[in-house]
Amino acid sequence: MTALKRWHEVVKSKDPNLLDDLLAEDCVFYSPIVHTPQEGRDLTKMYLASAMQVLGEGFHYVREVVDGNQAVLEFMGENEGITINGVDIFTWNEEGKIDSFKVMVRPLKAVHLLHAQMQAMLEQWNAAARQTGNASS
């Protein structure tokens, strides 16, 4: 199964544990909010798992452009009455693992809403990680 098909399975199931085998260990996540790239599988998983929760039930892809080992997937969703539009841009390596994942979101109202909700989700992840001794920087 290709990385793209595996990604669609993750989104459909909303099971972040499926990311363990899909993300490369050195995967880099580029957030629409955070200035610096988030490096590593664990941080990428944390961001993607949080996003799956805050983007809600209405999340769906409306367009897909694939070229070789890269894909751009346009998505739509709704959260608190705000329509969210954005793109996921990712690449995968020769092993079929995602090694780069970038998210871009519009409109600004959606960016602000997602920022607040993602911040809360990430704080929960970090609190849980501190309790188990696996806190990320």
Image (tube, grey):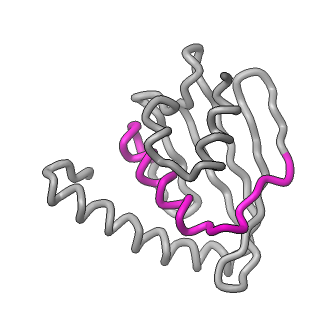
Figure quadrant of residue 125: bottom left
Image: 26 above or below 59: above
Query: Residue at point 40% right, 74% down?
Result: 120
Front in this rendered view, residue 7 or 72? 7
The image shows residue 119 at horizontal and vertical percentages of: 42, 71
The image shows residue 124 at horizontal and vertical percentages of: 32, 68
Query: Residue at point 52% right, 72% down?
Result: 115
Figure quadrant of residue 90: top right
Number of numbered discs overlaid on the protein picture: 0
Query: Residue at point 46% right, 28% down?
Result: 24
Please give left or right for residue 84 compared with residue 123 in the image.
right
Look at the image and say whether residue 53 sits in the magenta stretch: yes
Q: Quadrant of the N terminus?
A: top right
Please identify the residue farthest to the top as the structure is shown. 94
The magenta span reads 38-63
Look at the image and say whether residue 126 sits in the magenta stretch: no
Figure quadrant of residue 86: bottom right
Query: Residue at point 56% right, 53% down?
Result: 14
Please identify the residue farthest to the front as the structure is shown. 13
The image shows residue 41 at horizontal and vertical percentages of: 40, 37
Image: 21 above or below 61: above
Please identify the residue farthest to the bottom as the structure is shown. 81
Image: 1 above or below 128: above
The image shows residue 53 at horizontal and vertical percentages of: 53, 64
Please give left or right for residue 115 compared with residue 123 in the image.
right
Image: 120 above or below 103: below
Front in this rendered view, residue 119 or 56? 56
Front in this rendered view, residue 109 or 78? 78
